[in-house]
Structure formats: structure tokens, C-alpha cells
Amino acid sequence: MTLPYEQIVDAVGQGEVAPVYLLAGPDVLQVHAVLSALRDLLFPGSAWEMGLVHLAGAAVRPAEVVAALRGRSLVGRVLVIVEEAPWFGARERAEGESKERDDDTLLAYLERPLPQNVLVLRTTTEADRRRRLYRKIAECGVVLAAVPPKPPASTEWVQRHAARIGLHLTAEEVSLVTVRSGGSCSQMDTELTKLAAWAGPPGRIPREAFDLLVPPTSEERVFDLIDAAVAGEGEEALRIGAAMHQQGEAIPLLLFLLAKQLRTLIAMEELVRNGTADSATKQLNLHPFVAQKARQQVRRWTIPALVEGLEAIWRADISYKSGATDEESALYQALVGIVKAAHGSARERPSVWAR
């Protein structure tokens, strides 16, 4: 069966252990939580050192894994962990490659596994569900898709874990943690730990400190830049763009992010006009927090202005790539074009661009 990691950990904590686990995906926090629960249950104290068999790499053979599972330990149980298990990728067998990698030996073992021993197969990539071994594990064991949770699951995860460590976050701060960490459980846990350490017993954090501890993403800074442009605060928009560049953002990336945001607003405008803006999270593949910001921004733009802004970015990009202007001038040209499109006039180049 396929289960979320918290449910797997709860089951193991209650003594329910499957003969085999497949932990497939990049989110290390989820994987470590399951492994820790298994070790704590199977080998109290330091006994795990006598019952753990750790194998790794594409050179591992099924017969080697099964031999370890059929072995004995001083503590009466064996936990075999295979890192980088090579039997779950969607690929064809190379010419001359041994059929042993087709996992027949493991399949035979899983027909009658030893009840006291446990096998954990780990892969950082998504497992091919068409593989016979995958289907067998799903039938007699447990599969974890260790991938970053998507909203609203990621939001609920942050809420639960913040409450567990005594951290009081607003609804907006919860959303920002998920956005700024990319949704990864391990990264969200890192950010919450930093916030909790700063907050101390009260568990509350001023917004200024929150932004210092969990800095805004480049996409968020672009949101602020677009907001400033449409509000007629041209110098502020230019200041934000200059600051992003001076903090290490490459000019091509900045131009890409600006164009991406304007294209998102064009798509959002159509959804708003058709009364389907609530589905923007799915249709545009946006985080709910980002979709909400886009809905707020698009009300202050017109399609012609957005297109004019996109054309300004395109001209700046061509100018930079053709060598007609340097990178600062190209970014300045794009930002002035966006401000002009948003507010109808351009201002003089301010001093923030001076090095």
C-alpha cells in the first residue's frame, strides 16, 4: 500500500511493521522519519549496530540482499537498507546486462518473507509503478512517495509542525514558509527550526525578523517590483531591481522572472474575466499564495499595458544579448519600460544604479 510518511511512522510506533518498504523520492526528512521509527522499534538503544545491514549502489545484486535478509543477528532481527536501489527506474536493460537485475530473486523472497526481518529499498527518484517489484511491494509491504507535499497538504504540514514546537505563525507566514522553502519537508523543517530558535518561549516573530530569517524568494521580489511599478513608484521599482542584481541575481534570470510574471498576469486576467480565477492554482500551476497575489495585481493592469511591458523586456533582452548595451543598462531599460507601461511615464535614471 502507498501511505504518507506520518501515517507510516504512526503505524511503526504502534508496532505494525511490514516486511518491505520502498522509500522513493527526494524528500530526505520523510525518509529519515520512517527509518528512525523502524530503528527505534526494531533495535532499542544501540542494538541496531548488531542488526543493521547497509548496502548501496547500482552494483548491489538481489541475491546479496536476500542473503542478508536470510541471515541472523545477535538481537534476533535484521534490518536491511539498500540505498540507490537500482530496480525501479523506467529503463531498458543494456545489451549484455545480467537478467539478475530484473529482481526475480527479490520477488521470490517476498512471496515468503521472514517475519522478523525488514527490507527497506531507497531511491531518490520516483519509482516506475509498472515494475513487477514495485507492484509486489505495494501488495505485501509499504510504499512511500517521498516527494514535497503540494498545497493544501504543505500548508497543513507547516501548521502542525509549527504548533508542535510552540511557534505561533499567522496564516500569511505559514504560506510564506511553504513558498520560500519550495514545499520540501526537510527545508520547511529547517526554516521552522530557525524561526523557533529566534522566537523563544513566546513563539511569535515580528515580520521584519521573519523576512530576515526566511528571506523572500526572487519571485516575491519581482512581485514587489511589479507592485511598485503599477503604483507609480518608479524609483522604488528600479531600486528593487538594482538590489536584486547587486545581490547576485543574473541579468538573464531577472529578465526571465519579469517576463514570467507579466505572462502570468496576462493568463490570470483571462481567468478573472471568465470568472474562473479560483482555479488558477491548478490551471497555471501556481502556489495558492502566489495565485492570490497575482489576482490582486492583475486588477491594476490592462492587457495592453502588460503586453507593452513584455515588449520592453524583449527589447532589453535582445539589446543585451546582441552586445548593444551592458547588463545594467539592459535591466534598467526593461524596468523603465515596465514602469512606463504601468504608469504612462518614465523617470530619470536614479542614483541607485551608480556603483
Image: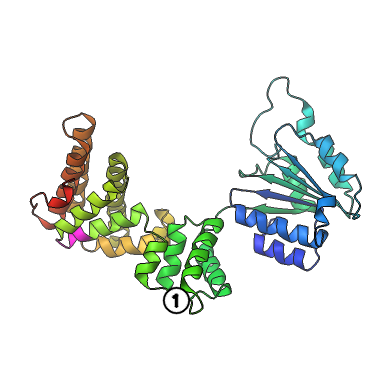
- Dividing the image into 4 quarters, which one contains the C terminus? top left
Q: Nearer the viewer, residue 208 or 85?
A: 208
Q: Nearer the viewer, residue 108 or 313?
A: 313
Q: Position of residue 223 (x, y in %)?
A: 29, 57
- Residue 282 in sight: yes
- Label 1, on which residue? 204
Q: What residue is shown at x 91% (from left), y 52% (from top)?
A: 74
User: In the rendered image of this protein, does residue 127 appear above or below residue 194?
Assistant: above
Q: Nearer the viewer, residue 120 or 73?
A: 73
Q: What residue is shown at x 15% (from left), y 57% (from top)?
A: 234
Q: What residue is shown at x 80% (from left), y 58% (from top)?
A: 46
User: In the rendered image of this protein, does residue 102 appear above or below residue 124?
Assistant: above
Which residues are drawn in magenta?
A: 228-232
Q: Position of residue 13 (x, y in %)?
A: 76, 67
Q: Position of residue 203 (x, y in %)?
A: 48, 76
Color encoding of the figure: rainbow
Apparent side of residue 34 relative to residue 189 in the rendered image (left or right)? right
Is residue 211 shown in magenta? no
Apparent side of residue 189 relative to residue 55 in the rendered image (left or right)? left
Q: Nearer the viewer, residue 78 or 24?
A: 78
Amino acid type of the residue tagged 1 in the rendering: Arg
Picture mark count: 1
Apparent side of residue 143 relative to residue 286 in the rendered image (left or right)? right
Apparent side of residue 145 relative to residue 152 in the rendered image (left or right)? right
| Label 1: which secondary element | loop
Q: Main secondary structure of the magenta part?
A: helix
Q: Position of residue 91 (x, y in %)?
A: 64, 32
- Residue 301 in sight: no
